[in-house]
Image (cartoon, rainbow, N blue to C red):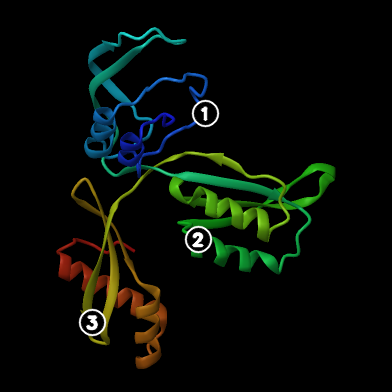
Amino acid sequence: TYPVPAPATAELLKGVPVRMDGFASIRKELVTPTGAVILSQLVDEFAPISMTVERVGYGAGNRDMEIPNVLRGFLGYSEEAAGSKRLMLLESNIDDMNPELYGHIMESLYRNGALDVFFTPIQMKKNRPGTMVSVLGEPHNKAALIEVLMKESTTLGVRVTYPERYEAERRIVDVTTDLGTARVKVATYGGEVVNVSPEYDSCRLLSIQSGVPLKQVYTMVLQATDATLGIEGSMD
C-alpha cells in the first residue's frame, strides 16, 4: 500500500505550499485528487488575507477520525488595496564580523533572489556596537537566503517575518533631450502618476558625453519627461 497522500494527489500538489507535519498522526486520506486539482488550478496565491466574509459553507465526511472530519470554506471579497504583496523579511544582529565581509554578503544575497538588502547600526548587549542585517525577499527564496546568512556571516540565528508591501506600478520610459535619450522610471498609483525618477546610469552617461553637470542633466530630463507625459510641474 502507498502512504498518503496518494500518488495522484501528490503529483497534483506540485507547486502548492504544503505542511507535512500538521496531521502526521492521522493515517487516512485528507486531500483527494479532486481537492488537489481545485487548489492547484483555481488558487492564485496562498497567504493570509484580510477579507469581508459573505458566506460560510461546511462539508462533512463519513469517516470517524481523531479530528472532526469537516471542511469549512469562506466566500468573500478582499479589502486590500491594489498593488499589495506579501513578502518575507529576514533579520540578524551581528557584532563580531569583519566589516569587509558585508559587501560580499550583500552581493551573495542579491544573487540568491533578495529584493533589497540593508544594514542598520544598532547597540547590542554589553554596549557593543553591532549591525542588523535585513533582507527583503519573496517567501519561496527563504531557504536560499537563510543559507547565505548562516554560511557567509557570523550570525547564529535569523528572524523571519512576513510583512505586506504596497507597491506603485512602475514602468521605464525613454525620454529625448537636447543631450540625447535618457531612461526614466515612472510610478503610478490608482491610475495617477505619483513619482518620476531619471535613471542614474543613463543621466551619468549623458553628463560624461556632453560635459554638462549631472544635476543639470537631471533637471533637463525631468523637464522633458513632463512634456512627454503631459505632467504639469516638475516631480523632482
Residue 40, percent from left and from top = 27, 38
Q: CA gap, disc 1 to disc 2?
A: 27 Å
Assign the N terminus to one quadrant of the image. Answer: top left
Horizontal side of 24 relative to 156 (left or right) equals left
User: Which residue matches tag 3?
Assistant: 177
Amino acid type, mark 1: Asp
How busy is the neighbourhood of tag 3: few (under 14 within 10 Å), some, or many (20 plus)? some
Residue that badge 1 annotates: 21
The percent coordinates of residue 81 (x first, y second) are 28, 37
Query: How far apart, in angstroms, are the residues tagged by discs 2 and 3?
Result: 37 Å
Residue under the point 23% across and 62% down: 233
Q: Picture coordinates of residue 195 (x, y %)?
A: 30, 58
Q: Considering the image in quadrants, where does the C terminus appear? A: bottom left
Disc 3, SS? strand
Mark 2 touching mark 3, by CB under 8 A?
Answer: no
Q: Earlier in the sequence, mark 2 or mark 3?
A: 2
- Regarding residue 119, the answer to whether it shows in the image is no
In the rendered view, tell whether residue 148 sits above or below residue 54: below
Mark nearest the camera among 2 and 3 is 2
Whole-angstrom CA distance, mark 3 to mark 1, is 60 Å
Question: Viewed as shown, does residue 217 lie left or right of 193?
Answer: right
- For badge 3, the amino acid type reads Thr
Residue placed at 69% from the left, 58% from the top?
Answer: 153
Mark 3 or 1, nearer chain start = 1
Q: Is residue 228 left or right of residue 95?
A: left
Q: Secondary structure at mark 1?
A: loop
